[in-house]
Amino acid sequence: MNAPVLSATGLLKRYGDLLALAGVDVTISAGESVAVMGASGSGKTTLLHCLAAIIPPDAGSVRLNAPNAAPVELVGMTENQRSAVRRTQLGFVFQEHLLLPELTAVENAALPLLLQGMPRTPAEARAAGWLAALGLSGMEQRRIGQLSGGQAQRVAIARAQVTGAPIVFADEPTGALDSRTSDEVMSALLHATTGQGRSLVVVTHDPGVAARCDRTLQMVDGRIAAPGAVTGVSTIGATAPAGESR
């Protein structure tokens, strides 16, 4: 098994009287895909948000072990510190892709690099490489309203990967798509992440999406009930653009 890229122990999170996470331990290995499933209110989205430094847990530890960087403890950071980690070391894909409609596809994909201070020309060149790798060559200058739902999600995947983040978090990334487009987007997401040696954590209600991942964590009442079996992953999908590490 590969070394862990993210390790969480004893995660507790309350919302008033509701115990959303009740002492959760999770380890995500480099290059693996993990699906998180569970009924509404089971704690799956809260778990993702704590692992991804979006919200802090009330107790516990979340340790990020990014390649070529010193290990970082996410719990105890300020919001500004967590924001910096999210911007530079983590990638995100959501059901509502959260792209900016006034920007073009390449501008949306390049945005994380621009926020880091990279000049526009190399930032957009790298973003264009990821768009091409995800089947969007020739669509760089289209605005989000000119793209289909599946194409927009591919732009979101490019945005999540453009910084080289070692781990990507996806919250119901196929929830708003039809079954065929969902399968295509999941293939693209897997091969833009695990296909390049990076890790993916995906919250989903779709057993078909979960079956594409290496293992499944089933959440019940704020706890992990049981891991799923390892399954195979299709090899049809995007490859990294030139200049990206595998």
Image (cartoon, rainbow, N blue to C red):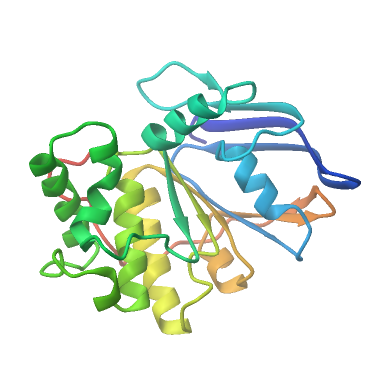
Numbered disc total: 0
Residue 2: horizontal and vertical position, in percent? Answer: 48, 34
Q: Is residue 133 left or right of residue 115?
A: left
Work out which residue is located at the far right of the displayed protein and give it.
17
Q: Is residue 130 left or right of residue 77?
A: left
Identity of the residue drawn at 42% across and 63% down: 97
On the image, which quarter does residue 13 sit in? top right
Residue 199: horizontal and vertical position, in percent? Answer: 45, 44
Above or below, comparing residue 244 to residue 218 in the picture: above
Residue 32: horizontal and vertical position, in percent? Answer: 48, 46
Residue 42: horizontal and vertical position, in percent? Answer: 78, 57
Work out which residue is located at the far top of the displayed protein and give it.
70
Identity of the residue drawn at 13% across and 42% down: 120
Q: Is residue 120 left or right of residue 240?
A: left
Above or below, comparing residue 65 to residue 28 in the picture: above
Asked whether residue 82 is in view, the answer is yes
Residue 210 versus residue 13: which sits nearer the camera?
A: 13
Identity of the residue drawn at 49% across and 70% down: 174
Above or below, comparing residue 25 to residue 132 in the picture: above
Asked whether residue 235 is in view, the answer is no
Residue 39 versus residue 216: which sits nearer the camera?
A: 39
Residue 51 versus residue 33: which sits nearer the camera?
A: 51
Identity of the residue drawn at 61% across and 30% down: 7
Residue 241 versus residue 13: which sits nearer the camera?
A: 13
If the image is split into quadrants, where does the C terminus sit? top left
